[in-house]
Amino acid sequence: MKERLQELEQEALLKVEQAETIEELKSVRVEYLGKKGPITEVLRGMGKLPKEERPVIGQLANEVRERIADAIEEKQSRLEDEALEEQLKNEDIDVTLPGRPIQVGGPHLLTSIIEEIEDLFIGMGFEIKEGPEVETDYYNFEALNLPKGHPARDMQDTFYITEELLMRTHTSPVQARTMNAKNGKEPVKMICPGKVYRRDNDDATHSHQFTQIEGLLVDENVRMSDLKGVLQEFAAKMFGKERMIRLRPSFFPFTEPSVEMDISCKVCGGEGCSVCKGTGWIEILGAGMVHPNVLEMAGYDSEKYSGFAFGMGPERIAMLKHGIDDIRHFYTNDVRFLKQYHNA
Amino acid sequence: MLISLNWLKELVDISGYTTEELSEIITKTGIEVDGISEPEELPQGVVVGNIISCEQHPDADKLSLCQVDTGEETLQIACGAPNVKAGQKVAVAKPGAVLPGNFKIKKTKLRGEESNGMICSLQELGVNEEDVPEAFKDGIFVFPEDTETGEDAVKLLNLDDSVLELDVTPNRADVLSMVGMAYETAAALARNYTLERPSYEEAKDKADSDVAVKIVDKEANPYYGAFVVQDVEVKESPLWLKNRLMAAGTRPVNNVVDITNYVLLEYGQPLHAFDRDRFNSNVIVTRYAEEGEILETLDGKLRTLSPHHLVITNGEKAHALAGVMGGKESEVHEGTTDLLLEAAYFDPQVVRRSANDHELRSESSVRFEKGLDVNRVAQAGERACELLQKYAGATILKGTAEEDHLNRKETVIRMETSRLNDRLGTKMEVQDVKNVLRRLQFEYEEKKGVFDVQVPSRRFDISIFEDMLEETARIYGYDHIPYTLPEGSGQAGGLTEEQRLKRNVKTFLEGAGLSETITYSLTDKESAEEMISPELKDEQHGAVRLAMPMSEDHSHLRLSILPELLRTHSYNTARQQQNLAYYELGKVFISREDEHVQQPKEVLRAAGAVSGEWVTNPWQQEKKEADFFVVKGIVEELAGRLGLSFTYVKGDVQGMHPGRTALVVCNGKTIGFMGQVHPRYQKKHDLKETYVFDLNMDLLLNLYEKEETFVKIPKYPSVSRDIALVVGEKTSAGEIEETIVTTGAPLIKQVRVFDVYQGEHLAPGEKSIAFRLLYQNPERTLKDKEVEEAHGAILEAVAAKHNARLRQ
Ligand SMILES: [Zn+2]
């Protein structure tokens, strides 16, 4: 019986070896390990054996059965691997074909610029304030030290609706409104982005509608050096640390002293070129210390409180950063223009 | 304003600085140099020549043959200018000379005759066409007779001058003159300048015995001085004077006019000379015009005046519009011998109004409008008299006839050094402040660092401490102010909830495939009132109109974003851009009852428009045109983002497809609409089939409630059941869904339409809608019986309410 088992093992292992498909292997399993297989038969005939031989043969039969099963297992996984290899060879695709397009949109370039500036000032502790685009003459002009008949009103040609109502010409009225709301007591630290309007003919450098961001800080003991510090911080983050800044005197009715800030020209590095009109500098924003009349009109004691304000045009910044030559691009919304700046 | 450096050089020492350096310093101390025009290509080898003889060219009608003495030699030159004559002193470009544009002069032959050089016009020498005096416009330039032959023509003509173009801010009217710029430059460079008092010989007779001045309105005209000038010889001005006018962009006319213009440039004080005979009176009366009074001004136009226009009269009729322009009748002409020379101070607002009304902005009116030095008015008149005596041989009567109500009160400003430093963040010493004041030539008294500064009348822009703060800071140098950061309130910056939500909505819409646009708020009347969202419809009564629009295209404030957004679609479609998906977040404007004083209500809206292929088909997938449900998918998902749920009701919006428009409802309130643009509108604006949405963001942001508490992820399995219901074709999926949800609550978790069918196997007028229902119990595993009961109830309810039967 022992010989019979060894014989069966030899036979089965050979058949496993010779099996070429999973199907063949399956029939080997059925043939040798199935309920009607020869090993089962051997075990069934064990009753005829002497008592002391029974465990020896039983163990041997089990060992043989296990060895055959292992061999089948091993062979099976080899055959499966081979089959998978074969299948994968046929699943080849052309990886250079395009992907399925998905619709993606993106922000307008001006929004990207505005949000970048917003985030920059938020980091310095500023809040964002908004206000109406149709303003009263009072908030747009008078509260900003521009009484009726002031010649500087000519600097900003205005779209009037009635004598009292107009399209705001700058976002400064938001500053006046914010200060007013504080009743001359608390500090103010804010920026106000938004659309503004001027009575201009649209051309490459003028647009009757454009955007502005202005900022205001009012507190006790605000110094002009603070304005310089904040603007330098802004310029370094917005345009790069390597750009120099320069402040020069200017005039705005709502600030005194007033300054204009230039940054060194990126194109020529300050040597002078056509972009900077030979000066080496590019004008970026206007700023100044809040005029005492403006503070007083909003209820602040100008002896105790002081402040600074600044204002800039996102269009201009976008044009400088990206070399855009015509302001009308921002409002024509040519899809080819918009898409260029979706990652801006 | 244009500043000739050759002129400035004579007033202040600017040696040691290049033009660029000087510009940089002037800009940094306060007057922006906007442009520098330096002679790039100076003519070379051009000298003054004397035309000895001038004869007709034997072989060319339009050419003259001239023998020209250049000091060194006599050259034969052919000249085509009509005004060439023997005896003239002219600019001669000798052979070898180079004119602007790299034009080299060579010896040549013209129609067989030698021509050894060229007699030049001013244009050929590089002078701007508009600066060339009338007499020399169409020919060569002729020097005055006493000019030395052989002299350098370039120097004589001041062509080697550099001109600075200044952008003067409205507050600094004091530098709208050479004298002002001289003070400014001296302060900037820390050099000296003093204005010298003019001097001339006065006749014995007194001006005020000859003429009387009468001012009717002292407010409008605080000062009027008249100089009586006799026996002038009207002729050409000397070359240097003409050069200076030309450098400043003023065209020379004759010596009298040129001198008044010159003094305007030099002193910043406008003057006016009347022809005495034609003025025809011994009294000068300044008064407001009468309604309908007529004045013919120098430009030959008849001006109809109103009672707020100030005029200068001879006691009877107007001879000048005060501060703006003189009258034609008493204009200085070739035969003029006697003058009345006006030096006056008019109220800025009065001049501004006259200039505006008559659209006459002049060098003169601009200066009156911006303000004048009260102490330099009469002095400017004296300066003109000095020049008239010298260059027109005038006799000038003693003094002036005048009426004077000018306020010459001095401004004194207290300035503490410590306060100065507090506000600037600087550490200036008392001596630093003194240095600044000395450079500015401001008088002061100082005790323990406290200055009382006496502001000179020429600096009428300075009236308060902050003005002096700026003045000190700019001369001290903005560069010397340190960089610090604000010390005060440690406020934490950030976005408000609303601002954050707005950004989220934008990001969502962009992720959903839409590109952001920014369009104009101002549009034409028709577009402004189209496609108004139903919830605004009742509130609004017409678009707000601008009082004085630049064009009708941008004359009204929009009541909807869509028309301008659709214009963007038309624009791009016309440029072969086929598949478009846009949105805009912006305001619309609703006028109020009392629209004259009350600001319109501004409503924030999110609008979008989609046309063309939504799913494109380059090679593999099925292509799909944008349709109602593409847009609805975006709107539904947006609602989800905001934690809201919208319902959709068929609605009617002007400009929209009547069968394909839905009102969007949230919490029982209409918050906008969506659907297809009306085919008629599409056709009119060359649009493809376009689908839009327009939502009231203000209402949505109000309705938004932040989901604060965590909702548990359900542990127990759900059961899904599909049903296909046959209903009448007018029955909407939405109504059935609502019935299912209300009947199936609380076990119904989700209802989804997955098929809509009409056609074979159904009766005409019928359709089948297939729903997938999801049942779930958050507390435990559902029992079959529970589901059966709920499902049965739903079937009964839809049968009863919508006459729906199960499709077999
Ligand atoms: Zn440059």
Image (tube, coloured by chain):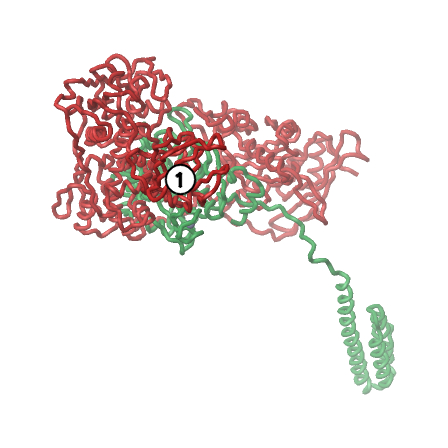
Chain colours: A green, B red
Q: How many numbered tags mark residues here?
A: 1
Q: Nearer the viewer, residue B719 or A206?
A: A206
Describe the element under mark 1 as helix, strand or loop: helix
> Can you see residue B1?
no
Residue at point 16% right, 23% down?
A: B397
B710 on left or right of B262: right
List x then y, in percent, for residue B557.
Answer: 48, 28
Rate crowding at label 1 as few (under 14), some (14 to 19) or many (20 or more) other CA atoms within 10 Å: many
Q: Quadrant of the C terminus of chain B?
A: top right
Q: Nearer the viewer, residue B241 or B504?
A: B241
B599 on left or right of B512: left
Which chain letter matches label 1? B
List x then y, in percent, for residue B636.
Answer: 60, 40
> Can you see residue B409?
yes
**B549 w.r.t. B783: above or below:** above
**B258 w.r.t. B470: above or below:** above
List x then y, in percent, for residue B545.
Answer: 47, 25
Residue at point 79% right, 75% down?
A: A69
Quarter of the rendering containing residue B269? top left
**A191 w.r.t. B369: above or below:** below
Queried on whether the Cβ of the residue with tag 1 lies below 8 angstroms from ligand 1, the answer reads: no
B175 on left or right of B648: left
Q: Nearer the viewer, residue B736 or B323?
A: B323
List x then y, in percent, for residue B245.
Answer: 31, 34
Quarter of the rendering containing residue B750? top right
**B343 w.r.t. B469: above or below:** above
Q: Amino acid at mark 1?
A: Leu
Q: Nearer the viewer, residue B320 or B564?
A: B320
The residue identified by callout 1 is B125
Q: Quadrant of the N terminus of chain B?
A: top left
